Amino acid sequence: MDPDHRASQDLQKQPEPLEDIVRRKAERKARAREGKSYSLWYGLGMFGLVGWSVAIPTLVGVAIGVLLDTRRSDTISWTLTGLGIGIIVGCLNAWFWVKRESRI
Protein backbone atom coordinates (compact mmCIF):
# COMPACT_ATOMS: atom_id res chain seq x y z
CA MET A 1 0.00 0.00 0.00
CA ASP A 2 1.48 3.33 -1.00
CA PRO A 3 1.83 6.20 1.52
CA ASP A 4 -0.66 8.44 -0.35
CA HIS A 5 -3.41 5.83 -0.10
CA ARG A 6 -2.73 5.32 3.63
CA ALA A 7 -2.89 9.09 4.26
CA SER A 8 -6.24 9.34 2.47
CA GLN A 9 -7.61 6.48 4.61
CA ASP A 10 -6.50 8.28 7.78
CA LEU A 11 -8.33 11.41 6.67
CA GLN A 12 -11.52 9.45 6.05
CA LYS A 13 -11.62 8.03 9.60
CA GLN A 14 -14.22 9.68 11.79
CA PRO A 15 -13.22 10.62 15.31
CA GLU A 16 -14.74 8.47 18.03
CA PRO A 17 -17.76 10.18 19.64
CA LEU A 18 -17.25 11.49 23.16
CA GLU A 19 -20.14 9.37 24.40
CA ASP A 20 -18.35 6.16 23.34
CA ILE A 21 -15.12 7.25 24.99
CA VAL A 22 -16.85 8.05 28.27
CA ARG A 23 -18.85 4.80 28.23
CA ARG A 24 -15.74 2.72 27.54
CA LYS A 25 -13.82 4.39 30.39
CA ALA A 26 -16.73 3.98 32.81
CA GLU A 27 -17.01 0.27 31.97
CA ARG A 28 -13.27 -0.19 32.47
CA LYS A 29 -13.45 1.57 35.86
CA ALA A 30 -16.43 -0.58 36.94
CA ARG A 31 -14.57 -3.77 35.98
CA ALA A 32 -11.52 -2.62 37.95
CA ARG A 33 -13.62 -1.95 41.05
CA GLU A 34 -15.33 -5.33 40.87
CA GLY A 35 -12.06 -7.20 40.54
CA LYS A 36 -10.34 -5.40 43.41
CA SER A 37 -9.49 -7.66 46.30
CA TYR A 38 -7.38 -6.62 49.23
CA SER A 39 -4.78 -8.88 50.74
CA LEU A 40 -4.09 -9.48 54.39
CA TRP A 41 -1.01 -7.26 54.13
CA TYR A 42 -3.08 -4.39 52.78
CA GLY A 43 -5.48 -4.69 55.72
CA LEU A 44 -2.64 -4.82 58.23
CA GLY A 45 -0.98 -1.85 56.58
CA MET A 46 -4.19 0.17 56.73
CA PHE A 47 -4.68 -0.83 60.36
CA GLY A 48 -1.14 0.33 61.11
CA LEU A 49 -1.63 3.58 59.23
CA VAL A 50 -4.76 4.40 61.20
CA GLY A 51 -3.08 3.42 64.47
CA TRP A 52 -0.01 5.57 63.89
CA SER A 53 -2.06 8.49 62.63
CA VAL A 54 -3.79 8.54 66.03
CA ALA A 55 -0.80 7.59 68.21
CA ILE A 56 1.70 10.17 66.96
CA PRO A 57 -0.47 13.30 67.50
CA THR A 58 -1.53 11.92 70.90
CA LEU A 59 2.06 11.42 72.02
CA VAL A 60 3.04 14.86 70.72
CA GLY A 61 0.13 16.42 72.61
CA VAL A 62 1.12 14.64 75.82
CA ALA A 63 4.76 15.65 75.41
CA ILE A 64 3.83 19.32 74.93
CA GLY A 65 1.49 19.06 77.91
CA VAL A 66 4.19 17.61 80.16
CA LEU A 67 6.58 20.34 79.04
CA LEU A 68 4.01 23.02 79.86
CA ASP A 69 3.24 21.42 83.24
CA THR A 70 6.92 21.50 84.24
CA ARG A 71 7.38 25.12 83.17
CA ARG A 72 4.12 26.58 84.50
CA SER A 73 2.25 26.17 87.75
CA ASP A 74 -1.33 26.55 86.57
CA THR A 75 -4.44 24.92 87.94
CA ILE A 76 -4.97 23.34 84.51
CA SER A 77 -3.38 20.00 83.77
CA TRP A 78 -1.70 20.68 80.46
CA THR A 79 -0.84 17.00 80.11
CA LEU A 80 -4.52 16.03 80.04
CA THR A 81 -5.31 18.96 77.77
CA GLY A 82 -2.55 17.89 75.37
CA LEU A 83 -3.82 14.32 75.54
CA GLY A 84 -7.34 15.40 74.60
CA ILE A 85 -6.20 17.67 71.78
CA GLY A 86 -3.82 14.96 70.48
CA ILE A 87 -6.59 12.36 70.42
CA ILE A 88 -8.94 14.72 68.58
CA VAL A 89 -6.29 15.64 66.00
CA GLY A 90 -5.31 11.98 65.62
CA CYS A 91 -8.90 10.85 65.06
CA LEU A 92 -9.44 13.56 62.46
CA ASN A 93 -6.19 12.49 60.78
CA ALA A 94 -7.28 8.82 60.77
CA TRP A 95 -10.70 9.77 59.38
CA PHE A 96 -8.96 11.66 56.58
CA TRP A 97 -6.81 8.64 55.63
CA VAL A 98 -9.68 6.15 55.74
CA LYS A 99 -11.89 8.48 53.68
CA ARG A 100 -9.08 8.92 51.15
CA GLU A 101 -8.50 5.18 50.81
CA SER A 102 -12.21 4.43 50.44
CA ARG A 103 -12.41 6.76 47.41
CA ILE A 104 -9.76 4.87 45.48
Image: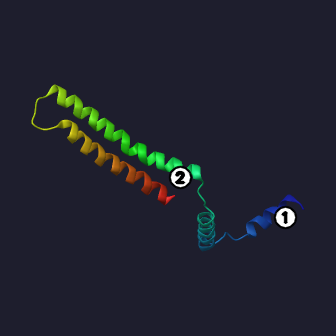
Q: Which residue is rendered at x = 38% and y = 54% of the image?
A: 95
Residue 93 placed where, x, y %?
Answer: 37, 48
Which of label 2 and label 1 is nearer to you? 2
Quadrant holding the N terminus: bottom right
Q: Label 2 neighbourhood size at 10 Å, few (<14), some (14-19), many (20+)?
A: few
Q: Which residue is mark 1?
A: 5
Instruction: Count up the numbered dots.
Output: 2
Location of residue 103 in the rendering, given as x and y in whole percent from the top left corner: 48, 59
Residue 51 numbered mark, or none: none
Q: Is residue 98 above or below residue 55?
A: below
Residue hosting label 2: 43
Q: Residue at x 66, y 70 (%)?
A: 16
Secondary structure at numbered mark 1: helix
Q: Determine the residue positioned at 49% across, 50% down.
A: 46
Residue 85, by quadrant, is: top left
Sequence-wise, the earlier of marks 2 and 1 is 1
Q: Quadrant of residue 58?
A: top left
Left or right for 96, reference 9: left
Spot occupied by residue 17 in the image (x, y as percentages of width and height)? 63, 72
Q: Amino acid at mark 1?
A: His
Disc 1 crowd rating (10 Å Cα; few below 14, some 14-19, many 20+) is: few
Q: Look at the picture and state if 46 lies above or below 6.
A: above
| Cα gap from disc 2 to disc 1, whole angstroms | 57 Å
CB atoms of marks 2 and 1 within 8 Å = no
Asked whether 93 or 1 is in front, the reply is 93
Q: What amino acid does circle 2 point to?
A: Gly
Left or right of 76? Residue 94 is right
Query: Residue visible at 48% across and 59% down?
Result: 102
Element under disc 2:
helix
